[in-house]
Image (cartoon, grey):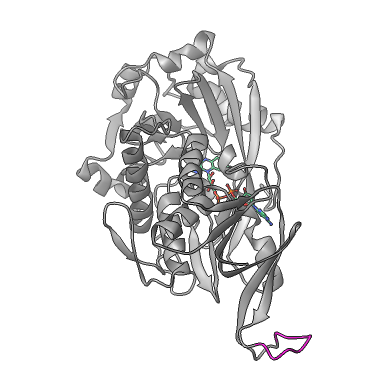
Amino acid sequence: MVYGLVVVGAGIVGLTSAYHFVRCGGGRVLVIDANGGPAQGNTARSVGGFRMGLFTSRVNRIISETTVKFYLDVQKSGYDLGIHQLGYLILLDISKYEQYVERVRELLDAGTAILLSKDELKKRIGFIELDLDDEESRLLELRPIKGAIFSPQSGYLDVEKLAKFYYEKLVGAGVEFLFNTRVEKLRLAAVNKIGHPREPFAWQEKKIESVETSKGAIEAERFILAAGAWSQELLDPLGIDSYIKPKKRQIFASPARGRLESFFNVEGFNDFNSMPMTFIPRGPFVAPRIRERSLWMGLSDDIGRRWGLDFEAEDLFFYDNVYPLLRKIFPVIEGVRPQSKWAGCYSINTIDENPVAFRVMNLVVATGGSGSGVMKADSLGRIAAALALDQGEVELYGGVKVPSTLLGIKDRKIEPEMLVF
Ligand SMILES: Cc1cc2nc3c(=O)[nH]c(=O)nc-3n(C[C@H](O)[C@H](O)[C@H](O)COP(=O)(O)OP(=O)(O)OC[C@H]3O[C@@H](n4cnc5c(N)ncnc54)[C@H](O)[C@@H]3O)c2cc1C
């Protein structure tokens, strides 16, 4: 039996791709994953944070905001995705202030981001330390904070609930799932076979004929590779480059007890009386989780963190890198010992850190979510489905139309994102 589409990977990108393929009337679909259920790879390790009105790059804005609008409407329709719009707060020190304010001028003018002065920050957050001009601060290379950018519509969602939404819709639509099944190889074949044992030859037109799995070969007319941080493992043997590499990211969680409760007693940012998700550019972040009443902390390290798959969370990474800086800015963090920790891998596009979606033969590659794959997943899935269906144009949620080659590798025209933190 030949499937209309086989999707490799049941993470959020595989799920959205299958969902939109079926919605657009594709044929019989099978989703394969090495794990025992949907979204147990890096999607499960995500913070689920999303930005609304907080990207400077046009492409970033389009693919994230149409995605988040879809999620918000799903939640409005009565399906709980655990969305909490508690806002993003980006603290700016004196060395970054002018530069960042200039970068987000358009967002400030549009009103999707708000500039807060040091005095306003101090008034709203009694327990924050902004002066940071003592010796220890200098040693930690912290500089006095001059103000912040606040994005009130940003927030986070529950990735498990989001994945469940797509999964249930797919099961309801008759999509088949094969879990606990590793795809070992994408098998290449000649389009016009001549019956030679060594074909396909270099001169022959080629296609992916089947996937070889731990449970045997499965044939399909087309394939979507949505294997996230593992994608290149299946592409290397074919000589196809997605420009995606994995890099480890770690989260440390602590219940907000004792002095940490201060994070949930803050007025003026959101309806939850909570601190927004708070970021220090190129430094640590702290994200309050409303329902669990806990704090998630982390830091996306760059140079010095090797490329590669690695799922070991390191205590010392927290105590050497995250804790000293956060404790200095939020002294109530003093003495915190995370009760849980986990690590996952970003799938990073090494050209511009934006997702990639391109088609080679009858294979579509959709990955590269980096640290924003969840907030871009619905649009990425629509683009992948359109590529698989050979459609030149894609309608994203809300009616925005883009070419299906928007995230392609050749002729890629994606402006760099200026608001990185
Ligand atoms: C710590 C952390 C925090 C993050 N925070 C955020 C955030 O706040 N906001 C945001 O938007 N994004 C965030 N992200 C990024 C986001 O989680 C990812 O971009 C997104 O989940 C990627 O989805 P995916 O479907 O591409 O990959 P995955 O969820 O990893 O799915 C890929 C699937 O493919 C399967 N697979 C791989 N190879 C094979 C094979 N050979 N055979 C069978 N199955 C295979 C895997 O088992 C896996 O289930 C974060 C990521 C991490 C690691």
Q: Is residue 80 visible?
A: yes
Give left or right: position of 82 versus 104.
right
Number of dots carrying numbers: 0
Residue at 47%, 24% in the rendered image: 288
Placement of 394 over or under 332, stated as above or below: below
Which residue occupies the foreground of this view, 337 or 148? 337
- Residue 217: which quarter of the image? bottom right
Closer-to-camera residue (102/277): 277
Q: Position of residue 126 (x, y in %)?
A: 38, 14
Question: In screen coordinates, is 269 left or right of 325?
Answer: left
Q: Is residue 191 magenta?
A: no
Q: List x then y, in percent, for residue 51.
A: 38, 41
Q: Nearer the viewer, residue 317 or 276?
A: 276
In this orientation, does residue 91 appear?
A: no
Q: Quadrant of the N terminus?
A: bottom right
For this orientation, the residue located farthest to the front is 1
Span highlighted in magenta in the image:
193-200
Residue 199 belongs to the span the image colors magenta? yes
